[in-house]
Image (spheres, grey):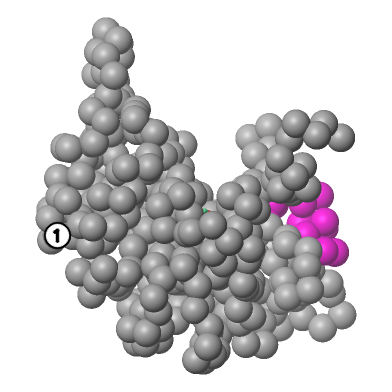
Amino acid sequence: MNDRIRPNVRCLSAYIPGEQPDDPQVIKLNTNENPYPPAPAVGHLLKSVDAASLRLYPDPVCRELRAAIALVHGCAVDQVFCGNGSDEILQLCLRAFCPDRGRVGYFDPSYSLYPVLAAAADKPVAPLPLADDFTVPAIPEEYDVPVFYWTNPNAPTSLGAPLAQVTEYADRSRGVIVLDEAYVDFAAEQGGEWAWTRPNVLVCRTFSKSYALAGIRLGYALGHPDVIAALFKVKDAYNIDRLTQMLGQAAMEDQAYLRKIVARITATRDRVASALRLRGYTVASSQTNFLWIQPPTGRSAPDCFATWRAQGVLVRYFPGPRTAQHLRVTIGTDEQMDFFLQVAE
Ligand SMILES: Cc1ncc(COP(=O)(O)O)c(C=O)c1O
């Protein structure tokens, strides 16, 4: 092994993104993308782009995009940060807030990127196990870490934790709580507005799910101006390209469209969840655009994964002690989900 490579990188297992199959016929229910197109203005803008404008660097601090986000959320522009996907923001949090040897916290199971980011930054991890039913347990008094990734609603389990539980930990933690709200638009309890006036909470959102823009890589964070200013100091100079800034702004400005596709997806989700329960599947009470399901007795999750895949439906299977009995199924269009229900007989 090449000893010029840092030891933590040498033994790092890279994050494994969900598969993107070449076959367009595959019903892709594996990466929590939105089955509907983004807001109509996004397509119109794309058609009208003047290629010559791409000669110029983009606005390094995304002023117009951040103003559009601040307007929707009713906060100040200096409380908004934009990242190349929320993944970039999650990574920058370690750069900005985690000291040498500082431990990185998150729930187990939750988003599998967190331990990879910690390992890449050479930080020790301090995962907190979720309860057997995947709810958030009482956090021990003595537990405190400089950065805690709190995914709410959680992935892959689809459950939301009451905001009171987050507040209780935030009130006593000396670290920064990164409230990863990638799926919050699909939840009954709407997000952490309370959070962005606190000096130790950062709310992370994404355009990849509810806004149907996973392809442009755009996420944003809302927080106290001090915390936001720290992220600006450690980011790359031009982390969001010109096209992404324009397209993200157009999507943010059409909240009516967002509400329409979110309502469609949540209605499909609840219908499919009921149908699966009638067939004996255990289905968590999802607050997201996916279902976390356990097959009926006598059928294993990896077997279902393989059988469904052979019939053209791709879902997500996470091997591992806490997740191996379950499958994560993204909500597609009604037509796609009807086909899924035939396959999942
Ligand atoms: C919990 C969670 N956070 C963040 C992300 C990443 O979002 P983005 O596409 O904005 O990087 C995902 C993507 O699947 C996710 O599940």
Q: Is residue 213 above or below residue 242?
A: below
Q: Which quarter of the figure is the C terminus placed in?
A: bottom right
Q: Position of residue 244 (x, y in %)?
A: 33, 32
Q: Position of residue 304 (x, y in %)?
A: 80, 64
Give yes or no for residue 56 being in the magenta stretch: no
Looking at the image, the residue that sits furthest to the front is 100
Q: Is residue 329 above or below residue 335?
A: below
Residue at image mark 1: 75
How many callouts does the rendering have? 1
**Residue 35 in sight here:** no
Q: Residues within 10 Å of mark 1 (few under 14, many from 20)?
A: some
Q: Is residue 56 left or right of residue 183?
A: left
Mark 1 within 8 Å of ligand 1, using the beta carbon:
no
Q: Nearer the viewer, residue 54 or 50?
A: 54
**Residue 176 in sight here:** yes
- Dominant SS in magenta: helix
Name the amino acid type tagged 1.
Cys
Q: Position of residue 187 (x, y in %)?
A: 38, 72
Q: Is residue 332 left or right of residue 86?
A: right
Q: Position of residue 341 (x, y in %)?
A: 65, 65
Q: Nearer the viewer, residue 253 or 172?
A: 172
Q: Secondary structure at mark 1?
A: loop
- Residue at x-position 69% and y-position 63%: 342
- Residue at x-position 23% and y-position 62%: 224
* Residues rendered magenta in the picture: 302-315
Q: Is residue 153 above or below residue 166?
A: above
Q: Nearer the viewer, residue 225 or 181?
A: 225
- Residue at x-position 54% and y-position 57%: 100
Q: Which quarter of the figure is the N terminus placed in?
A: top right
